[in-house]
Amino acid sequence: MIREIHIFKEGQTLYQDVIVGNKDLETASVMMLVATSAKKLQEWKIDSMEIERFRYVYMNSHDTQFIVTMDRQSSIQKVNEAMMSLVSKFMTVFESTLENNEWKSTDYSPFGTGFRKIVGKIPVKLCLAGHGGTGKTTLLELATLPSRGPPQEYVPTFFGDKALLKADFDPYIFSIFDLGGQDRFVQEWGKIIRSGSLVVIVTDSTKDNMAWTKRVAYPVLKTELPYARAIAIANKQDLKGALSPEEVSQHLGVPAYGMQANQRDFRERWLKLLKDLAFEEIDFAIVGEIVDQEIQSD
């Protein structure tokens, strides 16, 4: 997902739009570094650099530097295409301005609407990962098909399902992938989850399920999505013996949030969790940094 755009000329900020801020790094220092590299590029050439869990895609045109900050895990091809479109649209309006001293006093804010429209055309990839029967499909349908209501019986997902979700996530839309949780499908997840920014690890709040998650799911997720943001869902909280979200979080090493996915009343809570994960308004883990915890036997 695209997080920010910054446009500079002669060290002056012409325009910036921060959708999801970078809380891990000092933005001004990073922008100075990236802008210096951008200045060296030939006209309309795109390059990028990676710093921790972020990728900075940049271009130089008319001695003006364009820098897009994205999740490192996201598809760089789509962001490169977005960058070309963004700069083209910017130049259509402001090219003549950049060639004289008017650029120092021009209002570039009208560009923001076009920027956010382009961002909204690149779905944020979110993966629901977990064993079969934990409620991944129910969560998918709870989010995207509320009029039907969530399913009340378990039907296995073969390989994977996909659905687009547009809700109160402006400017983003989500492309949600429900990964088949049967053991024979997990090793195929890599074909589906590439370029995923967000991971929701779905559990049924039992020790056996969490042991499976750590043994089978974690190796694939850590290999394929090391820079993705992750939370866990402690589903089926209404069942007798369900571990609390705090216990699930402790065992999995990922912040966990309670859910009853088969209850329509939980839809607003579910959508808010997704929004807050995307905008980094709740606690989450970086997949590659998850530290496995030992599960004590009773």
Image (cartoon, grey):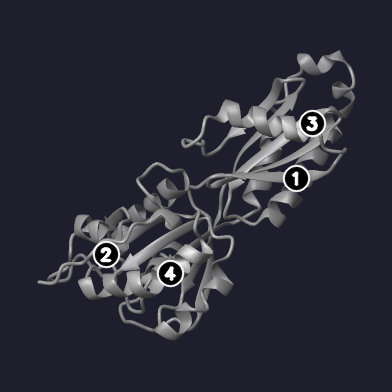
**Residue at 47% across, 73% down:** 179
Task: Tell me the CA gap for discs 2 and 3.
Answer: 52 Å
Determine the image quadrant of residue 90.
Answer: top right
Foreground residue among 212 and 256: 212
Q: Amino acid at mark 4?
A: Pro
Reading the chain from its start, which is encountered first: label 4 or label 1? 1
Q: Nearer the viewer, mark 2 or mark 4?
A: 4
Q: Which residue is mark 1?
A: 47
Considering the image in quadrants, where does the C terminus appear? bottom left
Image x and y of residue 235, in percent: 27, 66
Q: Amino acid at mark 3?
A: Lys
Number of other residues with Cα within 10 Å of mark 2, as a class: few under 14, some 14 to 19, many 20 or more:
many
> SS for tag 1?
strand
Circles 2, 1 touching at the beta carbon (< 8 Å): no
Task: Tell me the CA gap for discs 4 and 1.
Answer: 31 Å
Q: Which residue is mark 4?
A: 219
Determine the image quadrant of residue 45.
Answer: top right
Circles 3, 1 touching at the beta carbon (< 8 Å): no
Image x and y of residue 201, in percent: 37, 64
Task: Tell me the CA gap for discs 4 and 3.
Answer: 40 Å
- Label for residue 260? 2
Foreground residue among 246 and 121: 246
Reading the chain from its start, which is encountered first: label 3 or label 1? 3
Reading the chain from its start, which is encountered first: label 4 or label 3? 3
Number of other residues with Cα within 10 Å of mark 1, as a class: few under 14, some 14 to 19, many 20 or more:
some
Task: Tell me the CA gap for discs 3 and 1.
Answer: 11 Å
Reading the chain from its start, which is encountered first: label 2 or label 4? 4
Q: Which residue is mark 3?
A: 39
**Residue at 53% across, 65% down:** 224
